Image: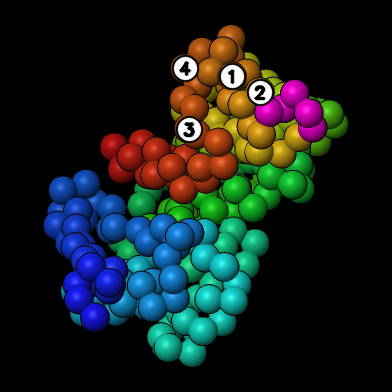
Amino acid sequence: MNEKDNPTQQFVLDVERSERNRFVEAIFCEGKNLEQISQIIQMMMEKGENVFGTRLEKEKAIELVKQFQGFEYHSLSRTFSLMQKPPPLLKGTLAILAAGTSDTPVAEEAHQLAKFYGVDVKCFYDVGVAGIHRLLKRLPEIEVCDVAIVVAGMEGALPTVLGGLVSMPIIACPTSVGYGLHLGGLTPLAAMLNSCAEGISVVNIDNGFGAACAALRILRK
């Protein structure tokens, strides 16, 4: 077998990333086989890094739990973490809102990454605009937080509604949850980009990971 036949020979870790921008290199597991994921984890552990991965299938997680002591898998978000040292705790609180139960996996991807980096997180799930009284009931708890991630599918209205009620930075994350002209998340993405609530930032469809990273950059300032 030559090097081209063995893709596990070609991984080059960005071990200086945490020094440049305070993020460790995350493992995007989709499209990687078990051997590749295992090797990357081992390489990161040897460098003394905490390890975080996304989009990991349950079947692979079962095998990785056997290989690595301290390996923790979160099935709803399909994320995993392996902690070798405690993260530095950040000042401030992150609110994560999910419009409906179907949006929760993306919200939980953001939640798990924020916890990985030592963020104090408060989750507010099932607070979509179809039952806006649920959002208004939780508003006193939400508005004392320092930054919010708002995850929504369907028409994607929740970030705009919240943006008209609170002053904190808002990161909107559309999901691929909806019918027909929802277009796999393009409809809420367009709605969030066209929001009339001032200053909302928008990440890509189903990108809870990216939303959490944006929140971390805000909290670290």
Q: Is residue 8 above or below residue 129?
A: below
Residue 203 percent across, percent down from the top left: 48, 32
What mark, if any, has residue 179 been given in the picture?
none
Helix, strand or loop status at disc 2 = helix
Residue 111 percent across, percent down from the top left: 54, 53
The answer to which of 41 and 181 lies nearer the viewer is: 181
Q: Quadrant of the C terminus?
A: top left
Name the residue tied to disc 1: 190
The answer to which of 161 and 73 lies nearer the viewer is: 73
- What's under tag 1, amino acid-wise? Ala
Q: In the image as oriented, which residue stretches furthest toward the top?
A: 196
Compared across the picture, whether 206 is left or right of 152 comes to left
What mark, if any, has residue 203 been given in the picture?
3
Name the residue tied to disc 2: 187
**Mark 2 or mark 3: which is in front?**
2
The prevailing secondary structure element of the residues shown in magenta is helix
Q: Which numbered disc flags the more N-terminal residue, 1 or 4?
A: 1
What mark, if any, has residue 199 been given in the picture?
4
Q: Quadrant of residue 119?
A: bottom left
Q: Which numbered disc flags the more N-terminal residue, 2 or 3?
A: 2
Measured in 3D between alpha carbons, the distance from the residue under mark 2 to the one under mark 3, in whole angstroms, is: 14 Å
Q: Is residue 74 visible?
A: no
Q: Does 18 appear in magenta?
A: no
Write down the region rendered in magenta: 179-183
